[in-house]
């Protein structure tokens, strides 16, 4: 619509600055009679339509010579104000193959002058042609009169010349009737500006450009904006729709499941937890990698909230950060990054020392504007949260630790594989935050040590080619792909959600700070 308005406005604006121009036309008839046939009193049976059309075109070309233009200007007293070339530039002569008529047109900024010029143009051209014919007849008459002085007056040749001379004198007296003005200019029509016509053309052109632009944008913009498109293209079930989180949660790196566990933002992760259980009902995978196509799709926020939701449901969950490129999980739980995974692998710390237990039974004491710490209440939502908090589930988080210089070799090492096996034996569910699939090969290398892969895809960010490549990688992965979680679902037009939480895949340097609401488990307890 915007393109239609802009093009139409441009057309109308252009009309407003155009000079006024008027066009008038006259018509000249060219007779099929041939001067030679008239003089001899015969008719040429070999004359063809093609030949006469050529004659008509020749006459049209003759009307464009400067002499005719000068005579036209001189007849109206414009010889000093306008040149022959200028007049020829503002006039034209056209032919019609179905008639013997020449149409002479003149365009001028003055309506009356355009009409006068068109009429004078036709008259002067006819006069020019007639003068040419008469001059030829005068020369022929002189030649015949000279010949009659030679042979005797009673000779056959003399009688023929006398008859021809008489015919020539009659033609001179009558003038050339082979060409004549049949219609002088009656009026001059305005040719510009034509705002109504231009406005209509602007609307039509705007519609054409708008439709063309829409198709072009659709062809060039390969981003997927509908959850159904991602689901169908991957061939995986959609396990959850997560909309964008509130600004305060993103700014303070807080999780909805901890800040307001009974709120609507946390509800979407309980739905995701339930859907994941049904999707994996046959395999009952105990180790799951969560990854995405590229960064900033929300996988870290998704896996952190999912881990809390599972622990609140009574499961023993270990959440480990294997994104050694850009780790982030420790920010959500206010943990130190070290000793972490690398500290265990390098022998600098034991598993018990590196694992941090997060208390998921009660909300954090620190409130967030608009999301204060959950207080006891009598409503059903708070009662459900209190019941969930009393379950024996536990959540342990294992950050990355010191980042290794060669991540590719580190994630494929036997020491890391053995660590995964140990972690898997100490919990009900092992959740692993892995780097994006299309940027590095870490997730594919780790997939050989786990049972399932869960993909996170952000609407408006992933493109068709990216999703196709992710599908190819998932099909080649040793681990089974369980499904896909859609983040930033609020961008999907025409849809509303009663609850939701979503993406935030923040990257940056680690933040130093003490562990809050976390403690290392005792050596006697099993994670």
Image (cartoon, rainbow, N blue to C red):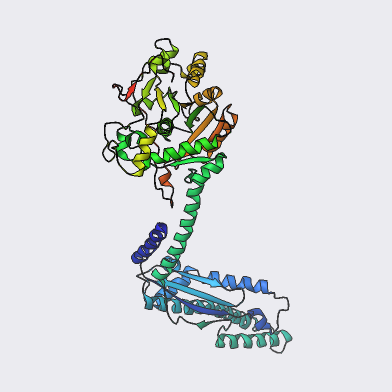
Q: Position of residue 483 (x, y in %)?
A: 53, 36
- Where the C terminus falls, by quadrant? top left
Residue 245 in the image: above or below residue 155: above
Q: Position of residue 229 (x, y in %)?
A: 52, 45
Q: Is residue 206 left or right of residue 380?
A: right
Q: Residue at x 37, y 60 (%)?
A: 10
Q: Residue furthest bottom?
A: 154
Residue 523 figure quarter: top left
Nearest the viewer among 16 and 477 is 477
- Where the N terminus falls, by quadrant? bottom left
Q: Position of residue 16 (x, y in %)?
A: 34, 66
Residue 75 in the image: above or below residue 206: below
Is residue 402 visible in the rendered image? The answer is no
Count of all numbered marks drawn on residues in the image: 0
Q: Residue at x 27, y 31 (%)?
A: 365
Residue 144 in the image: above or below residue 519: below
Residue 517 figure quarter: top left
Is residue 464 visible in the rendered image? The answer is yes
Residue 59 figure quarter: bottom right
Q: Position of residue 374 (x, y in %)?
A: 30, 37
Q: Residue at x 40, y 39 (%)?
A: 502
């Amino acid at each position: 619509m915007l393109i239609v308005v802009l093009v139409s406005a441009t057309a109308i604006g252009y009309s407003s600055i155009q000079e006024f121009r008027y066009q008038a036309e006259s018509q000249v008839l060219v007779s099929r009679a041939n001067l030679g046939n008239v003089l001899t009193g015969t008719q040429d049976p070999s004359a063809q339509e093609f030949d006469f059309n050529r004659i008509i075109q020749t006459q049209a070309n003759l009307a464009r010579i400067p002499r005719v233009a000068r005579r036209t200007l001189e007849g109206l007293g414009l010889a000093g104000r306008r040149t022959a070339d200028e007049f020829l530039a503002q006039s034209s002569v056209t032919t019609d193959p179905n008639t013997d008529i020449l149409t002479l047109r003149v365009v001028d900024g003055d309506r009356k002058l355009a009409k006068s010029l068109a009429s004078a143009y036709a008259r002067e051209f006819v006069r020019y042609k007639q003068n040419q014919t008469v001059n030829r007849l005068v020369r022929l008459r002189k030649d015949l009169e000279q010949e009659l002085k030679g042979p005797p007056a009673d000779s056959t040749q003399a009688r023929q010349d006398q008859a021809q001379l008489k015919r020539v004198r009659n033609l001179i007296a009558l003038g050339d009737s082979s060409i004549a003005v049949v219609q002088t200019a009656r009026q001059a029509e305005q040719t510009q500006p034509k705002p109504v016509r231009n406005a209509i053309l602007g609307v039509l052109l705007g519609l054409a450009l708008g439709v063309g632009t829409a198709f072009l944008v659709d062809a060039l913009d390969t981003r997927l904006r509908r959850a159904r498109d991602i689901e169908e293209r991957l061939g995986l079930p959609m396990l959850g729709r997560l909309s964008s989180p509130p600004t305060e949660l993103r700014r303070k790196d807080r999780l909805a499941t901890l800040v307001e566990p009974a709120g609507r933002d946390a509800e979407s992760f309980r739905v995701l937890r339930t859907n994941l259980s049904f999707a994996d009902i046959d395999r009952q995978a105990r180790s799951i990698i969560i990854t995405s196509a590229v960064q900033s799709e929300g996988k870290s926020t998704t896996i952190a909230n999912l881990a809390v939701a599972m622990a609140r449901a009574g499961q023993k969950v270990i959440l480990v950060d294997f994104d050694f490129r850009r780790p982030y999980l420790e920010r959500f739980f206010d943990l130190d990054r070290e000793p972490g995974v690398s500290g265990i692998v390098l022998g600098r710390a034991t598993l018990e020392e590196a694992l941090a237990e997060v208390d998921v039974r009660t909300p954090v004491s620190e409130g967030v504007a608009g999301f204060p710490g959950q207080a006891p209440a009598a409503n059903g939502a708070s009662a459900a949260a209190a019941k969930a908090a009393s379950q024996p589930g536990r959540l342990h988080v294992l950050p990355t630790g010191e980042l290794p210089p060669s991540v590719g070799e580190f994630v494929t090492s036997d020491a890391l594989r053995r660590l995964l096996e140990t972690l898997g034996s100490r919990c009900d569910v092992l959740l692993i935050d892995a780097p994006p699939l299309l940027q590095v090969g870490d997730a594919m290398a780790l997939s050989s040590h786990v049972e399932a892969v869960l993909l996170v895809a952000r609407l408006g960010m992933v493109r068709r080619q990216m999703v196709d490549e992710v599908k190819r990688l998932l099909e080649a992965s040793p681990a089974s792909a369980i499904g896909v979680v859609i983040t930033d679902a609020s961008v999907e037009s025409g849809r509303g959600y009663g609850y939701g939480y979503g993406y935030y895949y923040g990257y940056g340097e680690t933040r130093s700070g003490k562990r809050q609401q976390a403690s290392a488990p005792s050596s006697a307890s099993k994670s």
